[in-house]
Image (cartoon, helix red, strand yellow):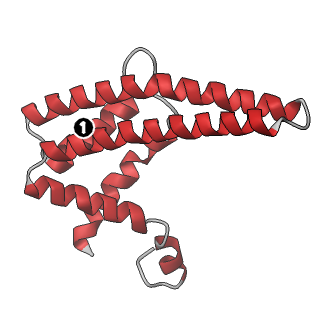
Amino acid sequence: MKRLFLPLLLLALAMPVAAQEEPPENGPGPIINGARHLIIEFLRLDDDQTAAWKVLWTDHHAAEEPLRQQIADVQAMIEDLFAAGAPDPTDLGLLMIDRRALSEALADIHFVYVEGFEFLLDEAQAGRLHEIRVADRIQNFIPAFKAFDLVHR
């Protein structure tokens, strides 16, 4: 139980990052900077790892942005078809295929980023990252356990 407390605490402190839809245009804001510091501290990243991660993050974000815009554009076209009434199934199908392909490309970019980050870590750091991932998976179950007084409130 004590081993999960720190990862859960860090996760709770970093949750506001998930609420940000995208970082501010003029560089990362205080929430992103705070989250970055927590990750560096929790995983005990050294200066070289931190610098490499910054490059990975920047490249990842730059690669995702045009795809996110293209997905939004295709989604707008899909919504326009429906708004106009009875959309042509062929046109709609082609747009759905386009959106799916763009979404898969976005997922691929994210996967490369995550793999690159994991490659930077030593075994102990990878273990701490794994703890955070486990905490993320179980966080939705915690209220149910609290409701039955199986964990402290």
How many numbered callouts? 1
**Would you identify the image quadrant in which residue 63 lies?**
top left
Q: What element carries label 1?
A: helix
Q: Estimate the x, y position of residue 14 in percent, counting from the top left.
A: 37, 46
Residue depicted at 39% across the width and 54% down the height: 12
Q: Work out whether residue 28 can be spotted.
A: no
**Residue drawn where x is 30% and y is 25% of the image:** 59
Report the front residue among 100 and 43. 100
Split into 4 quadrants, where in the image is the C terminus?
Answer: bottom left
**Residue nearest the viewer, comparing 91 with 7:** 91
Residue 104 in the image, given as x and y percentages of width and height: 47, 41
* Looking at the image, residue 42 lies above or below residue 19: below
Type of the residue with mark 1: His
How many residues crowd around disc 1 within 10 Å: few (fewer than 14), some, or many (20 or more)?
A: some
Please give the name of the residue rendered at 24% of the width and 37% of the height, measured from the top-left corner.
Answer: 37
Q: From the image, tell me which residue sits under label 1.
A: 37
User: Residue at 37% of width from left, 18% of height from top?
Assistant: 27
Residue 130 location, x and y as percent? 24, 60
